[in-house]
Amino acid sequence: SGMKRAMRNQSNNEAKRARAEQKKKMSVKADDEFTEKEENNDQNGVKKDLFGRPILSLGTWDQPNEQLLIFTPHGLEHRAKVAAFDMDGTLITTKSGKVFPVDTTDWKFWSDGVAGKLRDLHEKEETKLVIFTNQKGLMTKKVDKGAFKKKIEAIVRNAKVPIQVFISIGDASYRKPMTGMWDHFTKQGNGDIEIDKETSVFVGDAAGRHQTKERARKDHSCADRLFARNIGLPFQTPEQFFEGKTKEEVWGPVPFCPHDYAKTERTLFEPKDTPLPSPSREIIVMVGFPGSGKSSFAKRLEKDHGYVVVNRDTLGNWQKCVAKARDALQLGKSVVVDNTNPDKESRKRYIVLGAEQRVTVRCFEMTTTMQHAQHNVKYRMMFREGLDVSTMVLRMHSSKYEPPSLSEGFQSLVKVNFVPEFESEDEKKIYFQYFVE
């Protein structure tokens, strides 16, 4: 019986080794769902299922920071030629037919040919397969992280080829069209092999296409097309890549193009001969979106001309802003009000204060559009600790906005153009990427 037991143990070990080899080659039988519900580790760190059997992992998960999650399958080869994909609406779609998945098991490949095409790319064309996907729901906890990881592994398992997956779980510099995921991939995720951009491709469905007779719904954004532009890869839609369609659908315009903005020569002020500083004490009331460049301009007035900046973000409310402005004027200083001041009511307080203190009040309005302000906010978050200003906050400013008028009591109205300044060539290069979806 001892001999039998030893033989049985040996054959069990061989079977385990064979299973591990089989899993390593990724020739696992396609299986839509994972049966393991709970993963327990024994003292050696080996994952076990509920019945104590070792779970053979498909790859490793890594989270280098709060914004990024990475899946790397076993047996992945780093290559110069890359086929990179968005995930939802590109490689997969919902089984339910709904726009958004009902849960993490609600998926199927985008078309019958997807898995075969991926295998051909990997095996015949020696192409590395990578997914770059925005999944903000993981940050907001709308999507369960554990279940989502199983979904990713199920997709890779069903494709039967190794696919590296980069997941942006926030809304800062890792979110497409911003290049954080790609930067991490090229610097740390491809084994020091340089990407051949001419033979590589990025495929995505967020292409800014319009609703037409053939297309029931317009694309939800332009993020994938702009991401491809930012990273310098040729771009294709799933229809072009998987179905060979050659027709270019109508798309655009992009929400904000920094290149177009840079092409136009602008003076800082309109009228360009606006006197600064004022020969006598004054109040300058700024008007503009968050992210429009107001604060940078106000700081320049403080540094170059000794204006006192009053700002609601630092002081807390408008009453304290008015009190600080009054104190400064009484000390013989000029004041710049660095708030958004979208409507007559918010501006009136300073016109009243000007009359009370017998000083002139001018209005300086930033010409920066809402989309340009959005671009600036994203850029600011990359370099300086700054809070993200949501689209909702920008829309709120837009809905409250009343154009400033001389009839409010201003001595003059001045338009201020946003002129970006950079501390390095790197900063400049990044500013001219596309940030707004």
Image (cartoon, helix red, strand yellow):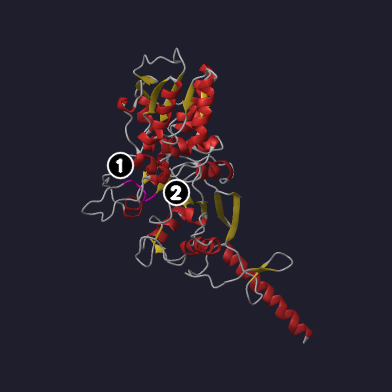
* Residue type, mark 1 in image: Gly
**Image: 340 above or below 277:** below
The residue sitting at the bottom extreme is 1
The residue sitting at the right extreme is 2
Q: CA distance from mark 2 to mark 1?
A: 24 Å
Instruction: Say which quadrant the C terminus sits in.
Output: top left
Q: Residues within 10 Å of mark 1 (few under 14, many from 20)?
A: few
Quadrant in the rendering for residue 409: top left
Whole-percent x, y for residue 225 in the image: 38, 44
Helix or strand or loop: what does disc 2 sit on? strand
Residue drawn at the location 36% of the way across and 51% of the way down: 205
The residue sitting at the front extreme is 356
Helix or strand or loop: what does disc 1 sit on? loop
Left or right of 405? Residue 378 is right
The residue sitting at the left extreme is 213
Residue 252's tag is 1
Magenta residues, as a range? 204-208
* Residue type, mark 2 in image: Ala
Q: Which residue is mark 2?
A: 83
**Image: 25 above or below 185:** below
In the foreground, 60 or 404? 404
Q: Residue 209: tell me if it is visible.
A: yes
Residue 3's tag is none
Whole-percent x, y for residue 60 in the image: 60, 57
